[in-house]
Image (spheres, grey):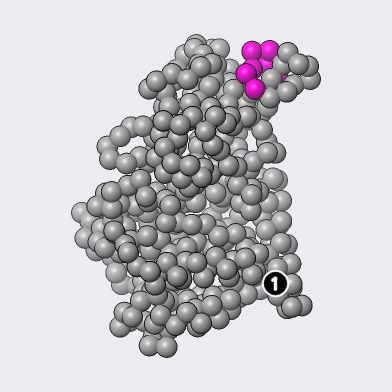
Amino acid sequence: MAQLESYQLKQITAFASLLKKRVNNQHITVVCQGDSMTYGQDTFSPDRRLAKSDPTCEIDSTYSEHEQAGTTYPESLQEFCDDIFGKGLVTVINRGFSGDWVEASMNRWKQNPHADVHFVMLGTNDSTTNFYVAKEAQQNIEKYITDMSKLIEQILNFGSAVVLLTPPKHSNEIDLMRNTYRKTLQLIAKHYQVPIIDTTQFYKPFPFQEVQSDNVHYNSKGYRLLSAKLTGILASMSSIYHPLQVRNQSVMIPSFDEYGIALRNQVDLQEQGHALFGVGSSASKGITFHLHANSKLTFSFMTEEDELVIYPLFKIIHEDCALTIELDFGIAPGQSSAGKLAFCGIQEQKLPQDGNQFHLPRKGHYTLSVENPGKAEGSFVYGFLVKRT
């Protein structure tokens, strides 16, 4: 018990250090550790690239010889982090290797990368009887528990916080064994008190042919979707243990402390007599997000309900101001442009308007980004109204 408490304390310490660095706008390093889905394998899509094309791969490390997608999830995670935090504040490292099971990954990546947090996504290969997986690891769930525990402890001994990701859903999967591994991973996470993210929810609104290159691996859009979700979770890391939950007839009110948020350039909370929500210094004043020129805010939230709609409510008071609002960095099913809304010039939206909303078809994690790309300050966000479709 004392040894377990020691590792739980290591997670708390590393997690707190990560949050402190984010508050102080200091550089952080993120490691993505896993199998072929982390490596970014794609041997069929037209935009596939040569092996180890992803610039987030470690220069001196050996990787699989399989081709990679036009973008991998660590690569897109780097791109999105540069956008929401600012270039140079986050470094992402790809420690994925095709075919790896937990023990193989643990033995492969023994060198401390001096990271602040590891996203660990392993278990797909452990749950199979594939020939390239060591015989003793094939569907040996007791070994999976032991090896995953050792891997978590290895990373915590590195001084890095751990976030576990369930093995993602593949094709029209009906795999009870893989689902058993996902449920087991949830119990391991609880044992070590590390956060766990259910990645199976990410892909449910998308036809599998749209996001996969074969029955297992993703294409560029599939990998970008995974990174879009994880970027939002990283932006709201302070709330990862208790994420913002939204439901029908709720309102996301401007706040810096009720949920985690990432800021680029100057965004502040401002009292306004015309604000719709929140409580200012007097009953007649509410709170708004005030976005200055070329500023951006990003946060994530969860919903436990299907078929919701989110309406942004805002005011722009200067002709040189604008608002661009994106859901999951604009990645939407099909050819839809519903992942992005753009407003320019003087205008106000205080009530829901058809056509100016985001559709949330399934429950799970979502990311919202709000940007003033204009040359002047004067863009105010009242909040986001949530309704059922």
Say what amino acid the circle numbered 1 marks. Tyr
Name which residue lies at 43% across and 18% down: 353
Q: Is residue 23 above or below residue 310?
A: below
- Residue 364 x, y percent position in the rendering: 48, 47
Is residue 97 at least partly visible in the picture? no
Give 125 or 362, whichever is nearer the viewer: 362
Give the image quarter of residue 43.
bottom left
User: What residue range appears in magenta?
Assistant: 271-277
Q: Is residue 275 magenta?
A: yes
Q: Is residue 317 above or below residue 24?
A: above
Q: Main secondary structure of the magenta part?
A: loop
- Residue 73 x, y percent position in the rendering: 41, 55
Q: Is residue 147 magenta?
A: no
Give the image quarter of residue 289.
top right
Q: Residues within 10 Å of mark 1 (few under 14, many from 20)?
A: some
Is residue 137 at least partly visible in the picture? yes
- Residue 312 x, y percent position in the rendering: 50, 25
Q: Quadrant of the C terminus?
A: top left
Name which residue lies at 68% across and 24% down: 278
- Residue 374 x, y percent position in the rendering: 50, 22
Name which residue lies at 46% across and 31% down: 388
Left of 218 or right of it: where is 154?
Answer: right
Name which residue lies at 59% across and 66% down: 189
Q: Is residue 89 above or below residue 191?
A: above
Provide the residue designation for mark 1. Answer: 7
